Image: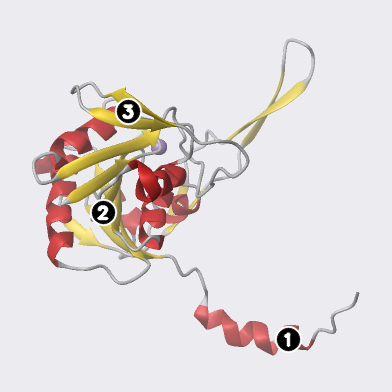
Amino acid sequence: MNILITNDDGIHADGLLALKSAFDEIGKVYVVAPDRPRSACGHSITLHKPLRADRVRLRDGSIAYATNGTPSDCVSLAMLGVVEEQVDLVVSGINRGPNLGWDLTYSGTVSAAMEGAIMGVQSMAISVATYSNEVEYAVAAALAVQLGRILQSHRLPESTLLNVNVPNLPTRQIKGIAVTKQGKRRYGGNIEKRTDPMGRDYYWLGGDDPVDSLDEGTDVKAIADDWVSITPVHLDLTDYSAIADVRAWGVEQIQLID
Ligand code: MN
């Protein structure tokens, strides 16, 4: 099995090396990852400047490719040339920080797995749900490998990927593993206004803890209760239940004017 590993925390992140070391046991691992942290870059791609993929050595001595692109670019670069063999599995992570609810729309980690799914390869994103610097990657790494084995014999539906979140706890404190749906997590939109030494205003976005809706069966609820959360995520963002309503508003009868 050929496994492509990428992330959004950058090529030197501990979570990337933990994942790589774990997958070394079950297949041939290729690492193509951003040369710097790219968290919260979403599914952006690089169109207006050249992309580089430089050979670098990871701390275990293995060769990897550091790119100046986004996580999604890394998957494209790998599939379209850097990795000369067929990739069987894309694994993105292990991210330091949760990817729950509406985080998915901002997440570079999840976007890399989305890019894998777009390219028709079995893909998963995996995150440890903590903002602490003391991160326990071993549990998530071992779980990722077990999920990778399952994905060898079970195909995800077309355009579907797995989004996995693991509590930052030793195994004995984790309650279990739940297959969940995407929940709701809202950031308060906190913006701090400050003044720089030149007297110009600047703004700093975020900083507040997110507000989670702790609905049963969701990823945010599972993590709040110290469960591992595994969500099958589909690339189709259509709200099917709203199609009839929006039609009924007469939008298809609007007269276009030039
Ligand atoms: Mn990240």
Q: Which of 56 and 165 lies nearest the eye of the viewer?
A: 56
25 or 55: nearer the viewer: 55
Q: Secondary structure at mark 1?
A: helix
198 shown above or below 182:
above
Crowding near the residue tagged with mark 1, few <14, some 14–19, many ≥20 C-alpha atoms within 10 Å: few
Local secondary structure at mark 2: loop
SS for tag 3?
Answer: loop
The answer to whether residue 122 is left or right of residue 187 is left
Count every numbered label the image shows and give the total: 3
Question: Dividing the image into four equal quarters, which quarter contains ligand 1?
Answer: top left
Above or below, comparing residue 236 to residue 201 in the picture? below
Q: Which mark is residue 27?
A: none
For the point 26% across and 52% down, which residue is it?
A: 87
Using the image, tell me which numbered label, if any, was put on residue 86.
2
Asked if the residue under mark 2 is in contact with the one under mark 3, i.e. CB atoms within 8 Å, the reply is no
Q: Measuring from the top left, give residue 66's x and y in whole percent.
A: 38, 30
Q: Residue at x 60, y 36 (%)?
A: 49
What type is the residue that disc 1 sits on?
A: Glu
Which amino acid type is marked by label 3? Ala
Mark 1 near ligand 1 (CB under 8 Å)? no
